Image: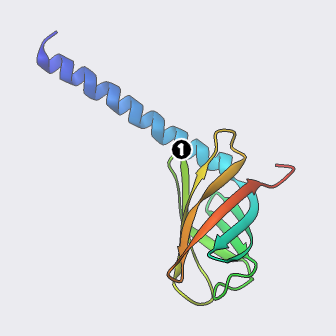
């Protein structure tokens, strides 16, 4: 096999792998759809959070998170790379909330870190029962 043919073969294999990863990530976003709930922590403060993932984004609602508010807020800039789910949400006050949560192998839990109002937040979410 000459060098040019070998290089073309390697590029072809890599392109197929990348296409498969994109398909998995796109299909994976559909597998994240539904309601996820659990605690959030910021230093000595904590509360509950409910995230609903939909095709076009979703919603988030916190209890006890100062400056974010207790109402339901839309999530935007959603991204799923096959391993981690990232999003952004704007609360009532403060800067934007950004977070990246890693999905476990079973697809039943998402854990990770976010940032809001200059402080880190830790999330521990579970898929709601019945989904």
Mark 1 Cα-neighbour bin, 10 Å: few <14, some 14–19, many ≥20: some
Q: Quadrant of the N terminus?
A: top left
> Mark 1 highlights which residue?
82
Residue 13 at x, y = what percent? 34, 25
Residue 78 at x, y = what percent? 55, 61
- Judge from the rendering whether residue 129 lies leftward or rightward of residue 44; answer left or right: right
- Furthest residue in direction front, as rendered: 44
- The type of colouring in the image is rainbow
- Residue at 68% x, 59% y is 124
Residue 7 at x, y = what percent? 19, 23
- Judge from the rendering whether residue 122 lies leftward or rightward of residue 81; answer left or right: right
Toward the viewer: 18 or 83? 83
- Furthest residue in direction right, as rendered: 130
- Judge from the rendering whether residue 22 lies leftward or rightward of residue 29; answer left or right: left
- Residue at 40% x, 31% y is 17
- Residue at 62% x, 48% y is 103
Residue 36 at x, y = what percent? 74, 59
Quadrant of residue 35 within the rendered picture: bottom right
Toward the viewer: 44 or 7? 44
Toward the viewer: 103 or 113? 113
Q: Secondary structure at mark 1?
A: loop
Residue 32 against residue 35 in the figure, above or below: above
Residue 121 against residue 30 in the figure, above or below: below
Count numbered badges in the picture: 1
- Residue at 59% x, 71% y is 121
Residue 130 against residue 60 in the figure, above or below: above
Toward the viewer: 6 or 122? 122
Quadrant of residue 37 within the rendered picture: bottom right
């Amino acid at each position: 096999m000459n060098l040019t043919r070998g290089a073309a073969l390697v590029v072809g294999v890599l392109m197929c792998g990348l296409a498969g990863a994109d398909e998995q990530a796109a299909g994976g976003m559909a597998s994240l759809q539904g309601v996820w709930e659990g605690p959030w922590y910021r230093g000595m403060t904590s509360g509950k959070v409910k995230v609903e993932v939909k095709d076009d984004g979703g919603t988030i609602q916190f209890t006890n998170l100062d400056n974010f508010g207790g109402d339901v807020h839309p999530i935007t800039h959603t991204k799923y790379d096959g391993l981690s789910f990232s999003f952004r949400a704007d609360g009532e006050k403060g800067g934007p909330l950004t977070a990246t949560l890693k999905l476990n192998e079973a697809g039943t839990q998402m854990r990770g870190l976010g940032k809001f109002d200059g402080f880190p937040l830790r999330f521990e979410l579970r898929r709601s029962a019945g989904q």
